[in-house]
Image (cartoon, rainbow, N blue to C red):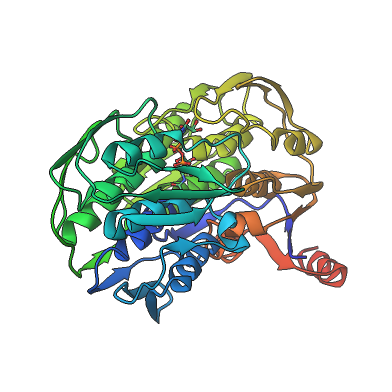
Amino acid sequence: MEQYVIKGGAPLVGDVEIGGAKNAALGILAASTMTDETVLIENVPDVRDTKVMMQAMESIGVIIDHIDRHTIKVNGRNIRSQIVDGDYIKRIRASYYLIGALLGKYKSAEVTLPGGCNIGTRPIDQHLKGFKALGAKDAGVVGGGMIVAHADHLKGAHIYLDMVTVGATINLMLASVMAEGQTIIENAAKEPHVVDVANFLNCMGANIKGAGTDVIRIKGVERLHGTEYTIIPDQIEAGTFMFAAAVTKGDVTVRNVIPKHLESISAKLIEIGCEIEESDDAVRVVATGRLDHTHVKTLPYPGFPTDMQPQITVALGLATGTSIVTESIFENRFKYVDELIRMGANIKVESSTAIIEGVDKYTGAGITAPDLRAGAALVIAALAADGYTTVDDIRYIERGYEDFDTKLRNLGAMIEKVDNDRDIQKFKLRVG
Ligand code: UD1
């Protein structure tokens, strides 16, 4: 099984190119199946989640041409089935976007219940409520884990979401875009990837207004057409490298980003003592001394993202004094803290709060990535730790980070992907 082996201690220095946003790509891939014309999509990140999504699309007859590593042409003209099943589909949570897309286009969808990161119970009641309001009266989970939704006719509706949910907001945009009349989604998520999916649908001829605010209005159109579109940069990949710079006392410029999307992350880095320089499409993070403590609570956009919570916890674990991190989106997102404690962190978790007493250093250990973002955060901890760390289950990290080890190595990190003990020994001999 593949692992990362890491020797800590090298500050990260240099430039890193950020790829396309995974969570936007997943919505956009589903949306691209909703026209019979060809769609060209650029800046698709080459990560496991997008690969699984494309595999699911191909399994129902979508034709995907790979123009280069990050550019694809999609054609959904020959979709022969509205049933997406198979065990592999459980590997990604965003498979549920195929429900919205297939329901919106064919008024019929059956998709195996999603998996994804194990960070707490992840209900889909808001998605189902919305599908029902649009006319899919049977929307629900049946027979051991299929989500089904069928409608004779989809009609616009006024939908109030009980909580801010990215998944339901995107799914309901997909399902309603060709419904008769107007749909209003209230308490909508405002994340950059919600806006990107809406922009993409509008390029395909949809009429969506208000994405990026908490009220989205969708006027149904008869059909969608082909388009060419470039996916926005990944806010979380960028944020992860920014925190890697902070934790290793480095100097890293993340390039090809939208600095506005990174504001909550930059603000926290400034608070804990980093210098931030912004330009049009880049952000430079410089960290010199020890980081300062702070308090942070995860919130929907524009608040501090839950997907950056493990990375900031790793940073605060090395900061002066006491810091408090409160997770308000997912109930079980501190599981990785046990691994961090094995590396020497002093952190107590009480339900949704982590109380962190900063320590001087982490120490290398054999650890396991529990999920995507926590896995990346533990790699950052290892980059700053004394000695060697091995990270197991890196398949989680590869769900959402393209060439993570290569990008880190290019910044001076001592990290290698290995799959046997001999290679670990070779790495140790090489880096000393
Ligand atoms: C998406 C992101 C994920 C990110 C999260 C929050 C994708 C593929 N994943 O996940 O990386 O961490 O947004 O920014 O884009 N909820 C319900 N009922 C529902 C839907 C959600 O109770 O029907 C709850 C969830 O349990 C959670 C909160 O709402 O507590 C937010 O979830 P949501 O925004 O939907 O997250 P995802 O779309 O799953």
Give residue 248's position: percent from left, percent from top.
61, 45
Q: Residue at x 22, y 41 (%)?
A: 211
Give residue 146's position: percent from left, percent from top.
53, 51
Q: Is residue 131 left or right of residue 226?
A: right
Q: Who is closer to the viewer here, 398 or 118?
A: 118
Q: Who is closer to the viewer here, 265 or 213?
A: 213
Is residue 72 shown above or below 333?
below
Q: Residue at x 79, y 41 (%)?
A: 363
Q: Is residue 62 in sight in this rendering?
A: yes
Q: Who is closer to the viewer here, 157 or 116?
A: 157
Q: Who is closer to the viewer here, 2 or 101?
A: 101
Residue 20, picture quadrant: bottom left
Q: Residue at x 32, y 72 (%)?
A: 76
Q: Residue at x 17, y 55 (%)?
A: 202
Give residue 223's position: percent from left, percent from top.
16, 62
Is residue 159 shown above or below 207?
above
Count of marks, rendered view: 0
Q: Is residue 279 in sight in this rendering?
A: no
Which corner quadrant holds the C terminus? bottom right
Give residue 151's position: percent from left, percent from top.
31, 49
Which corner quadrant holds the N terminus? bottom right
